[in-house]
């Protein structure tokens, strides 16, 4: 089994697309009063030609995690 066989069939996101998604996620979270200070592009994958660019969500405190849960579970 190779690493390529474990990757999703969809094309990996470009670095520009990753930056756009980070900006959109920051904006969406901000609409709910939520800030993730560590939210950004994972620079280890940004520079690697062998792995898709990943988004670093980072760590947050319990209050922020609760706010995310509340925002995601509102109907």
Image (cartoon, helix red, strand yellow):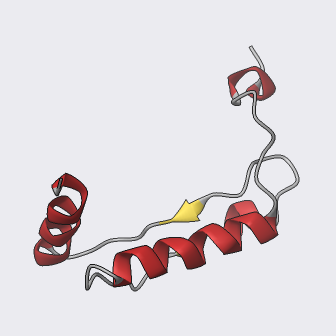
Q: Residue furthest front?
A: 75
Residue 36 visible in this rendered orientation of the protein: no
Work out whether 9 lies above or below 59. above
Q: Quadrant of the N terminus?
A: top right
Image quadrant of residue 48? Answer: bottom right
Total marks placed: 0
Horizontal arrangement in the rendering, residue 70 relative to residue 10 (left or right): left
The residue positioned 16% from the left and 71% from the top of the image is 67
Q: Using the image as rendered, state which of residue 31 and residue 8 is in the foreground.
A: 31
Image quadrant of residue 62? Answer: bottom left
Q: Residue furthest top?
A: 1
Work out whether 53 lies above or below 2. below
The residue positioned 18% from the left and 59% from the top of the image is 69
* Horizontal and vertical percent position of residue 68: 23, 66
Q: Residue furthest right?
A: 49
* Horizontal and vertical percent position of residue 36: 36, 80
Horizontal arrangement in the rendering, residue 69 relative to residue 43 (left or right): left
* Horizontal and vertical percent position of residue 73: 18, 53
The residue positioned 22% from the left and 65% from the top of the image is 71
* Horizontal and vertical percent position of residue 27: 46, 81
Work out whether 25 lies above or below 48. below
Work out whether 68 lies above or below 75. below
The residue positioned 16% from the left and 57% from the top of the image is 74
Residue 51 visible in this rendered orientation of the protein: yes
Q: Using the image as rendered, state which of residue 46 and residue 27 is in the foreground.
A: 27
């Amino acid at each position: 089994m190779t690493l390529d066989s474990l990757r999703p069939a969809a094309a990996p996101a470009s670095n520009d697309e990753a930056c756009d998604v980070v900006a959109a996620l920051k904006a969406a979270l901000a609409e709910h009063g939520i800030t993730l200070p560590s939210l950004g592009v994972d620079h280890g994958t940004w520079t690697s030609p062998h792995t898709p660019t990943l988004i670093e969500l980072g760590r947050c405190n319990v209050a922020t995690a609760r706010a995310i849960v509340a925002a995601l579970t509102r109907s």
